Every structure is written in structure tokens, then in C-alpha cells.
Amino acid sequence: MATLDIPELALVALVGISGSGKSTFARTHFGPTQVLSSDTFRGMVADDENDQSASADAFDVLHYVAGKRLRAGRLTVVDATNLQQHARAGLVTVAREHDVLPVAIVLDVPEPQCWERTRNRSDRTFGRPVLGRMQRDLRRSVGRLEREGFRKVHVLRGVEEIEAAEIRYEKLYNDRRELTGPFDIIGDVHGCRAELEALLLRLGWTLHRDEAGRPVNAIHPQGRTAVFVGDLVDRGPDSPGVLRLVMGMVAAGTALCVPGNHEQKLLRKLRGRNVTVSHGLAETLTQLDAEEPDFVAEIAAFVDGLVSHYVLDGGRLVVAHAGLKAEYQGRASGRVRAFALFGETTGETDEYGLPVRYPWARDYRGSAMVVYGHTPTPAPEWINNTICIDTGCVFGGTLTALRYPDRELVSVPAAKEYYPPVRPLLAEPDRAAGSPSAAERGDFGLDLRDVTGRRHIDYGYGTLTVPAENAAAALEVMSRFAVDPRWLPWLPPTMAPCSTATVEGFLEHPAQAFEDYRSAGVDRVVCEEKHMGSRAVVLVCRDGTGARRFGPGDGVVYTRTGRPFFGGEQDRALLDRVRAAATASGLWAELDSDWLLLDCELLPWSAKAGGLIREQYAAVGAAGRAALPAVLELLDRADGRALPVGELRHRMARRHADLVRYTEAYRGYVRPTDGLDGVTLAPFAVLASEGATHAARDHGWHLALADRLRAADPELFTPTRRRVVDLADAGATAEATDWWLELTGSGGEGMVVKPYAGLAARDARGRLLQPGVKCRGREYLRIIYGPEYAEPDQLAVLRDRSLGRKRGLALREHGLGLAALDRLAEGAPLWRRHELVFAILANESEPVDPRL
Amino acid sequence: MVAVLITVTTTHQPATDLGYLLVKHPDRVHSFTVPTGTAYVVYPEASAERCTAALLLDTDPLALSGGRGRSGRGTGSTTPDDFTLGQYVNDRPYAASSLLSSALSIVFRSALRGASKDRPELAATPIPLELRVPALRCRGGADLAIRLFAPMGWTVTATGIPLDPEHPSWGDSRYVDLTLTGTLRLADALNHVYVLLPVLDDAKHYWVAPDEIDKLLRAGAGWLAEHPERGLITRRYLAHRRALAGTALTRLAELRLADEPAGADSVVEATDGGADEDAGLPATVVRQPLAALRRAAVLEALRSCGATRVLDLGCGGGALLTDLVRDRRYTEIVGTDVSSRTLDLAQRRLRLDRLPTRQRDRIKLWQSALTYRDDRLRGFDAAVLMEVVEHLDPPRLPALEAAVFGHARPETVIVTTPNVEYNVRYPGLPAGTFRHRDHRFEWTRAEFADWTAAVAAGHDYTVAISGVGDEDPEVGAATQLAVFTRSTAGAAAHPTAPPAPAEPAPATPAEPAPAVAVAVAVEEEI
């Protein structure tokens, strides 16, 4: 019985003449969607599976589909005769383009049997000479397949062998997804054995030594696995010693190792190839001269057996010497190996004559963390979930390990500079003083493709599709008006109102807000006064050090669409005040953070929206005040002439009264301010700080912190009046309702009712709850729905309002916001955070009644 | 809902004959259903000495907001915080506007025509009239109301209405209480208000269709062609649709009897700081095409660097693209803009759909943002950033630099931006203000030189700076132009910036009229 080994990801070409049973074989061993049959594609493009004139088009489409499948990492089987070299070459090309291995399975069935089968098929019309020609092609082909690029060739001879064959899938060498670590990933050692020993000891490893005292193995008491990123050798003082230890660890199963370009070159030298002895190879060769030939042979075998890269921990971690872009991970081809060993270069050289490396990491959008070395860097930094941990030990830098999954960096300093660097390790003079982070350099690399087009986003709390036109609208806002995306970690979601009131004369009423949450299974809510101001998000840093995370600057204040709040000096002055209050109330130390993200309301509304109040609200009032008294006056005179205008006059009088109430409503939002004088800030949530999102904390915690800020600076901060209400307690809900009536009766905007448990509160079935519903005052709503909305006829119409869209939108934006905070806390790359914030903004383009 | 109002009073005796002219009996209350609500005609006084007819329009809010279901937080809206609630809370129910005007045309149809079955001679006779509109929205202020009505023989009283008596510092609203007195034919009087109420209001409530031209010319018969402000009246009445306004002005010109100096139509409106760039400039200033000079300079720079594949980054409405398409040397032309609406406009302007395929294939319009890297922009010979950088907040400039000079890396980058020093040469530009509302900064020559030098050094380019427009000995040229040349491009010689064509002073800041008016709306923060 023949067992055919096939890589799990491969392009399998069946090779055989007509009637050899390829389709049957494919059906037997592979799933129907895995098999691409040339007959099917001919039928697809020409309505006739046997129309040979359609073959070129049919193969075009077949290659296209094969490419899509391979790109997605799916095994693909091509059911065609594949008897001609050009046909096979097309398949090899497709396989190589996607860095998968091409495999051939030849079905060699004697011609007579094939003729028998062909003759019995009504849809095959060619004669026996054709079959004979095919048979000759097959004979010629079999010997060539490997040279043509097929990495595995299986030949099955005769019907019996074909029927008995079995497919066995083999994993690629680089696929070690089953290893979950934890790992200690170690950067370029370059013969620095002493530093390697020191680093392993720092990491808690126990070294095992041979009789001569040379370390030959190491074991971690917690069972950690070391992963070496390559470049163990060259330049440094003891490359053989490093190899001895690493080879021992690999053999003992306590370490994995990927090859570096220096190992590659060493191997070529050991194999007697003609290589230029440079870049520290001479030192290694001298050191190896003192070693036993057997050990040198072992080294050659060891290096030869190294796999270009590893995919570890379920695909979440990739280790390669020079890094690896997403489309190469878990693939096998010459260029994958070359990338892993050497990285990608631009073809240019720098002023030191070294190749200029293409910054692939800047473009990296893969989900796996990539850890690599190869390029010495003064301090490792995360770029899009990738990190280079070569800290130039041999050049007098440090030897660095990354502890996975902890993402913790551990370094030991080099005892000395063993080898002069070609390019200064600290390339720029100011780097010595603390190298600028990627964020600081501005090279944070947001790509248009991260945000535009129709995008499907799985944000952990749900999934959503952002229509291309919404993204297009958001792009303009984001690009032209918003603050720097690095400083825009979150945007406030829109908030739905409570269900429409059933209480006579009201459109919104606390009874419905309470009922909304009661029916969602919430037993405790907090009612927070709805401040009569503008939303303001404050991202404040203790000092300039916050710049390491966010870029140059020490904070921003932005609006609900991400625009600078006032812009310029006024924002900076506001930040200074907030910073001082945070310092005075000890928040930096308490939250162990040098920055805070606060969700606030800035008052009064007129400070930001003065123009709107004057040009929109006051103007309507002015027009009404000019028109209505004149109307009433002339109707009075008409009434005096005994014309029947009584009913009309009555209506107009009511409208005048409505207009007066409306005027009072907008006037409540006006308070004189001069710069920051008269401006107050009401924080109500501490959304995030270094390494943490506070969405899971209850509102008592948030409001208590807000109160402490107020205590520190009572002039700037304004308290948020609130009531905590147990929804089962009728007395408490009644009391809260009275409180609301009192607030709104004296000109207040209303309140926001939130689940007390916090922003991330979920219902019994684990679904996110609305983070809050607004319950707006009867008078306030005049400036939303119009001065006369509360007239019975209008109210009756308005009560028909539908809240579904608004609620859905609010919940989606809320989920996106929570996910953005999560990603901020876990240090996700900027593009991963920005896509969510951008999606919130794009959602705002959804057509929803703006009055809700 | 509520009423908007106009009253018509006469003291012609017997005054109650007004009822015959209006075809509305003074002793009854008349009501009519009109598309926007209910109109009433009531006579608060009707004696032989003095008779007043009042037209009230009781508007229907649902008819005004276009129905209940419609709404829209900014679909297609380009301003982040524009005020969509305006649809629900607005002055339409109170203020005289096109709504009242169209009600007028329905209710007083025959009076507008000057026809009267019962009093034909009276209808043809000028009579003493007083018209009052207590709440008239008047864009341009009381002054403009006088300029518009006085030429027809009206004595105009326009009293400003305060925005809010509790906040006297806010000043007057855009409404006036308007009284017109004069001796005119009633039909003329009604036609004047029929045309001029919406003109003063300047926000028509319905879509302006081409047949509006006919309506305007009909209602304006006998007075509009002679009116010194006919340009403004026509443009506003036709809601700033240039094509329509152009047609109407031509037809008016044909009606005009006397020859008048050319350019008399270019009336400068006393705007409230809207999109009109030349607000405040004297009407006599002949507009210098700085925008055209700038385009010429950019094209010259492009020609000298030998580019054939070019990017116009921030192409706006496509003014430069139009020039590029005409020049066959450019084999691939890409215009990008961050606003998809602007791109639609450019597409229409370029008439791409009418170009033959081979021509059309040379030009592409893409939405792109200069603060994001865009792979599509790599590999071009040259990129133009014409009057673009100053529309970005300074903290975002590094992102633009990284995207254009770091990522797209064309061999040549041409940047133009205003020279703020030159602003003192614009008499209409108040000191300290920028040439365009959306400019986030304007640079001195030294600032521009610093920026260009830093960008060139940081991204391996060399740079040459020149000016566009006449070179003022003190303050330099109106526009600054920089040509960056990539050092590794292999081109040894840096193309020198083209000499700016000599032009007589003074130039005005002819900002390329923002294709879609860059509306920096007041921020809605609810």
C-alpha cells in the first residue's frame, strides 16, 4: 500500500492521461472544494467541458482561484492532465507566488485500460491516437517533474496501486504551533558566550557543564523554552562555546534555534564553498581550529538542520532571524528562507556601504508577534507587533531576551566592545541621551489601507462592516480636523435616549430609563446629572515622558469628533490645570501611570458652541420675538373688527408662550467666559491609564476619582451630582424621579442613567449593555425638537420615534471604544487602535435622527 | 405652527378698494392651503381712510423638515460637526423668506400680475402704499435692504432686531423689521417683495430649477434690468448656481437698454464672512488671477523637471488637472483629494465621461489623505502640493512629510503656499487674518525656507524656492513656491524654479475658490 506524504499546505498537481482516474482519485482523497478541475473551469467559461479552445481562459481562471486559495493557506488540488511542461510550469509559478510547495501525483495507468474508460464515456470524443500521444507525453514528463520544481513527486503505477494509495499529511518543519512556551527569546549572541551564560542565569536557567566546565545544556526550572534568533557565531570571543551550549539545549529539547545569515555563511565555508572571510567569520574559523573535527562536523550538521523560521503558540508567535512578513509566515520557499535570513533590502546602500533595509515592520499588519534580530539597535522597540532584540552585544551593547508571553525585556551588558561596529550603534548623537521611540519620530506608519474601503472589523465585542462611503467621510474628518491619531486613543460613543415616555406631557422620563435597565436585568444604576456643556476627552500626561507612548507633547483635549477642543494655548492651559490636580490628588502613583484618559463634559456650552447658540438658537428666538407679537397685535385689531380670529389668536398666543420657554431653555447654556475663566470641567470616567483600561470598574470608583480632582481644584472641576438607585426599591426610583424633575424644572438638561457596575457591564447572557441612556428634561428638549414640540398634537407625532437604529449605533460605537481601550492597554500597534477609533467616527456617518 | 407675516397698507381713498385689488374681501378671514402650510389673509383695519391687509403663513413643521422619517447625521457631510438639527429648530416659521414669497404668489396671484376685474385703472395706478415685514431675514444687513428697495422709489426703514435682549453684547440678529413706504402700483410693490424677500433671506427652501430664471425675469419685468444690484439679486435668487446665474445675466443684458461699462455686474456683496474670498475688497479692483499665475508657475516647474507621470495632491476641484490634461506630455495624471465630494466636482469639471477612452485613461481621481501612507502614490515623477500644506494643522505636517517625501518619494515635489508677509498688500484683508478661513497657518518667507530645508534634509531632497506674482521689494511675492528634487534621482541639475511672469500690482488673494465651500461649521456639541 502506497502512502503519499503531502505537506498540509501544498499545491497538488495530478498528472495522468485521460481515463487514468484522476477525478475519481481526487474525489476519493480530497474534499470537493479542494479540487480544481480543468473540465469544470472549461465548462464555466465556455459552457462545454470539452471545448479545448477555451483551455487558455479556463486555466487563467483556475490559476486565479488556486492563487486565492493558496494565499488563504488552503491545500489545493489541480485535476487536469498536466502532461505538458507549460501547463505544469503555470502551476509551479502559482505555488511559488504563494510560497507553498508544489507536489505532483502521477497516475500511470496502462493505455488500454484508459482507452476502455474513455470509450465508455459519452462526452469524450477524441480517438485513440490522442490517447497514445498523451501516454508518450506522460512517459517523457515523469522524469522531469523534480527538475521543474515539484518538491515531492509520487508516482502510482497501475490501477491497484492507485486504489490502495493513502494520503498522509505532514506538517511543515516551521510549523511548531503546538509549542506554547513560555519562551525566552534570545537576540544575536555573536560568540558572546559569557554574556549568554549571564543572561540565562538572569532569566533563571540552570547551566549544565561538561568535565571541562564548558556549558553544554541549560534547563529552566519552570520548563521555559529558549528560542535563539540566530547569529550565534562570528565576531565574538567564543563562537564554538556558544554553539556547544545552544546545540546542547536544542538536542535536550530546552531550546529552539533559527539560523542567522552568519550561520548560513559559516556552513558554506565549512562545506568548502568559496566565501569571503569577512564580518567576523575569521574569528570563528580561528576558534574552530582549536576544536575537534567531530565537533566541527556536528556544527555543520546542526546548522544544516536549522529551519528558517518557526511559527509557535498556535500561530501567535513567529521567530525568524531577520523577521518575516505575514504572507511568508508558515510558508516554504527560497524567498521565504532568504527573507528570514537577510530581510528585505531596498537595493541601496547607506553611507557605510551597508545595504539599506526595507522597513517591512512598518508595513506589518499580521496578527502574529514577530521576534527577530539581525539589525543591531540601541533599544528594542515594538513596531506593529514586531520587535528586533539584537542589541549589539558583540559591539559593546547588551544581550537581550524577550520573555514571552509576558513581553518583558531582560538584558545583560556586554563585558566590552569585542568588535568595532561598521556603523555606529548609536547612529545619531542624541540617541545616547535616550533614543526616540517610533511614536516620537512620527514614523508610526498609518496606511490608507488601514482605514479606507469597505472594511469588516472583528473588535472582540462584536463584528461590524464599515461601508466604504462612511469610511470616506470619516477620512476627511480625521485627516483635516482631528488631532494626531497617536493622541486619539478613543472617541466617545453616541448615546441613545431612554425609551419614549408614556407619562403624559413628556417625551422622555426617568420611569422609562429605569424600566429599560430593569428589563435588561440590571438591578442597580447610577443617575448622573447631564451637564450643560460639551463633551471633552482629556488625555493628560504627567510630563513630557508620556510622549514615549503617544508622540511629542504632553496631552490633548479633544471633542467628540476628535478635534482639538479650543486649540492652542487654551487647551494647554487646561491641561496644566488638570495635570496639577492629578498630581495633587496622587493619581499618578495610585494608578501607576504617567498619563490618564478622562471622559468629561466641559462647561458652559457657550464656551465652545457660543456661535451656534447665537446664530442658531438665539436667532430663532429673535425671529419669533419679532414676528409673534406683531401677529398678535394685528389679530387683536382684527378681533376688534369682529372678525372671527379668536381660535387663530389663541393658537398664536400659545406659540408665543412656547417661544418664551424655548428662549429660557437655551439661555441656561450661556455663561460668560473669558479664556479659561468661567470654564469648568466635569470628569465622570477615568477611561484608561498606563497598561490598564478602567472600563470594568464601577461608577462609584470613577466618580470618587472625579471628586478627588475637584477637591484638588474646586475652581476648575465641577461635581457630577448623582443618585445611586436600586431598581427594585420603589422609594429610591421615586426619589430619583423627583430629583430629575427638580433638576430639569430649574433649567437642567436632564440625567444619564448608567448601570452602576461600569462601562463594560453586560447582561445575564453576556451581551454588552447600553453604557448609559439619556433622559432629557422637558424644557431642554425644546431646543432639540423645536419650541412647540410639547404641544399635544406634535408630541403625539414625536412619540412615534423609533430608537432601534440609534441604540444599535450606540452599542456598536461603545463596543469599538471598549476594544480601543483594551488595545491601548495591551500596547497594540497604532494601526490596530486607530482602525477602531476611525470606525467609531465612520459610524457617525450613519443616517440616524440627530434629535435622538 | 407659527406665522410669518407681511402687511400691506394703503391710504388711497377709498382705502378699502385694496380688497378689490387683492381680490380678498376686507370683512372676512380668508384661508388657503399652500404647500408649506396654511396662509391667512386678515384685515386688522379697513376704513375708507386706511386699509391694511395682512398675509400670515402658518407653516407645517413636517412639510418643512421634509417628512418625519428623513433625517441624517451627516451622510455625505464633510464637516465634522455641522448642525443637522437646524432642520428641526430654525427660523422658517417666524421669518419672512422664500416661504412667504411663494405663499404670496399663490394667494395674490392676480394682484401680482397687475390684473383687476373690478378696479383695472386702480391696479394700473401708483397709490400710496406701506408694506411691513416685521421679521425679515436679511443677509447683508439693513443696508442691503435699502440698496435693494430704494432704487424702485421706496422709502425704506429697516430696524435691526437684537439677538437676545438679555445678552446685549451679542448685538443685532440677522433679522430686520422692514417698512417700505412709497407711491407705486400695487403689482410692482408685490413683485418687488416677491423677488427681494428670498434674495435678502439668501436661503431658498426648495431646489432651484432652471425654470426659476423665467420666474425671475417675469417678476422682474420693468425693474430688474435697470437695478444697480441686479447681479447680486440674480445670483442670490438663483441660489448661487453660477451656470444659471450666468444665463440669467446674459438674458438681462439683452434686455438692458443703455450700454454700461463692462464689469458692472461684478458687484461685491457685503457678506457676513461666507465663502466669498473677496469680501471687503473695493468693487473696482480688477481681479488679478493669482490662481492662474500660480498654476502657470507650477506647470512651468513641472515642465522643467521633465516629469510625465504626475500627482496633483489635494487637487480640489481640478483646476490644475484641467491644464495637465491639455498637455500631451503628461502620460499619467493622478489627482487626489481627501474629500470625495470635491472629487465628484473635479470629475464633472474635467468632463471625464466625455473624454475618449485613451484620453480618459491618462487621468485618475483618487480619494487619499496626505496624513496616511498610500502605496498607490509611489513611483511617480512629480507631485504637486499646490496651496495644500496650509490646510493642515502644524502638528500633522510630519505625517504629510512622511507620506509624501518618505513614502511616495517622487523625484520632484512642488509645493506652493501663501506668503503671509504679502497679506499687508491686500487692503480688504484685516490684519492678522488669513486668506482663507480654513488656513491653519500662513508662513513668512523665513518660515517656509526653514520648513523646506528641514524636509529636504530629512528626506534626502534638495530644494529651490521662488515666488509667484510680482515681487514686492518689502514683502516678497504673494505665493511661495518650492521645488524639491530627490537626491538619488540621478538628475544632476536641479531644475530652477521658473521665473514668475511679471504682472502689475495689486493682486488679490485669488484662492482657488474652494470647490465645495470648505465649511468650517460651528461645532455642534450636544
Image (cartoon, rainbow, N blue to C red):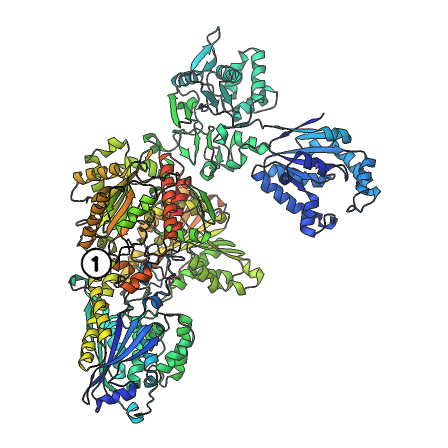
Residue in front for this viewpoint, A580 or A502: A502
**Along the viewing direction, whichever of A453 and B425 lies nearer the viewer:** A453
Q: Nearer the viewer, residue B471 or A446?
A: A446
Please count the marks in the image: 1
Disc 1, SS: helix
The structure residue drawn at horizontal position 22% and vertical position 91%, both measured from the top left corner, is B14
In the image, residue B30 sits, relative to residue A183, either above or below, namely below
Determine whether, in the image, residue B296 is placed left or right of residue A689.
right
Residue A121 falls in which quadrant of the image?
top right
Q: Tag 1, which chain?
A: A
> Position of A354 compared to B77: left or right?
right
Closest to the observer: A342 or A222? A222
What residue is at 32 percent from the left and 90 percent from the top? B116
From the image, tell me which residue sits under label 1: A665
The x and y percentages for residue A801 are: 35, 57
Looking at the rendered image, the quarter that the N terminus of chain B falls into is bottom left
Q: Is residue A321 above or below residue A300?
A: below
- Is residue B11 shown above or below A705? below
Q: Is residue A121 left or right of residue A526?
A: right
**What kind of residue is marked 1?**
Ala
